[in-house]
Image (cartoon, helix red, strand yellow):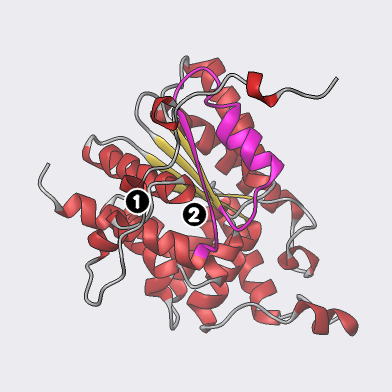
Amino acid sequence: MPLDRNRLKRYSIHERPSKVTPEDFAAECSPGKSFNEFLDGLPRFLQANQLRSLIDTVSEAVRNGKPILVLYGAHVVKTGLSPIFCQALSKGWITYAATNGAGTIHDLELARFGRTSEDVAEALEDGSFGMAIETGTEWNQAVNEGAEKGMGLGEAVGDWILSKGGPSTNQSILATANDQGRPVTSHAAIGTDITHIHPESNGESIGAASYRDFELLCQRIPELNDGGVVINIGSAVILPEVFLKALSVARNLAGPVRNFTAANLDMNRHYRPSQNVLLRPTRSSGQALEVIGPHEILVPMLFQGVCEKLAQPK
């Protein structure tokens, strides 16, 4: 028996819910647009909506005195974003931050010596990868001395940079954080950083300093409750794992840590940021936002948007 398509139950397009209308289209390009005009002219879909929502959320948190915690990987430093992070720390757009071991290494190299990031593939051929004397010596001295003073790893390296100076100290995230009294914790994984291979390296000092930073992060996480923001930028494994455990400790000891915004900015979607930063922490409350794209474009857009929002009357 042939299929009788005349029996199909159809409807008018005017009665159908539709997800795309011209009101949500992008604005035409024109010379001389302000950043606000550019941002408002982006289409009202997907990543553009997520970015605008994150800008609004961070701006509201700053105005309400709620904390903004940024978890950042070393790629953030290597893509030239330190000046924006330093400004954000100074302005209070970032309340406190956490990075991995590599984040402190690139920060130190840039601050003290004005350069960072070697050609790994080429240097690996002859075993010279990671063997810079100054980096290995200074980073480990900073951590060893800081551990003896009871400092966390992030504070220890930041304190070293401030005390020694260098060509780019004013663009050091760690030094700026120390100077502003805003903690930047560092969470090392033994064997993952070039500084661990040098003779000055002391696993006991690294472990002690990094563990102090973990405890400090656990103590600060409760501040996210009811309006705070946590943003993961460019850490696919270590910081999402650290954040998840710190959140569990905070909820266990301090009570509810809920109704906060969790966001992820990265070049690709990864499992751990998705689960450990976005979905699991906000399962019963709060909101999760994700913007995928290059750090060197997204981070300036985010904080320029925040800067513009905060310049407007309430």
Q: Position of residue 203 (x, y in %)?
A: 76, 53
Q: Position of residue 60 (x, y in %)?
A: 26, 39
In the image, what residue occupies the spot 64% across and 77% down?
Answer: 117
Q: For the residue carrying disc 1, how many other residues have a C-alpha within 10 Å: few (<14), some (14-19), or many (20+)?
A: some
Q: For the residue carrying disc 2, how many other residues have a C-alpha within 10 Å: few (<14), some (14-19), or many (20+)?
A: many
- Tell me the quarter of the picture where residue 119 sits: bottom right
Q: Quick check: is 280 in the magenta stretch?
A: yes
Q: Is residue 249 visible?
A: yes
Q: Which residues are magenta?
A: 266-295
Q: Position of residue 97 (x, y in %)?
A: 47, 48
What is the spatial separation of the Cα atoms under label 2 and label 1, in whole angstroms?
Answer: 10 Å
Q: Amino acid at mark 1?
A: Gly
In the image, what residue occupies the spot 22% across and 51% down?
Answer: 309
Q: Amino acid at mark 2?
A: Glu
Quadrant position of the C terminus in the picture:
top left
Q: Quick check: is 148 in the magenta stretch?
A: no
Q: Is residue 142 visible?
A: no
For marks 2 and 1 on the same chain, the one whose residue lies earlier in the sequence: 2
Q: Secondary structure at mark 2?
A: helix
Say if 139 sits above or below 216 in the image.
Answer: below
Say if 241 sits above or below 161 in the image.
Answer: above
Q: Nearer the viewer, residue 50 or 76?
A: 50
313 on left or right of 141: left
Q: Nearer the viewer, residue 95 or 20?
A: 20
Which labelled disc corresponds to residue 181? 1
Q: Secondary structure at mark 1?
A: loop
Please give the residue where the numbered disc 2 appears in the rendered image.
155
Q: Nearer the viewer, residue 212 or 123?
A: 123
Q: Position of residue 230 (x, y in %)?
A: 46, 39
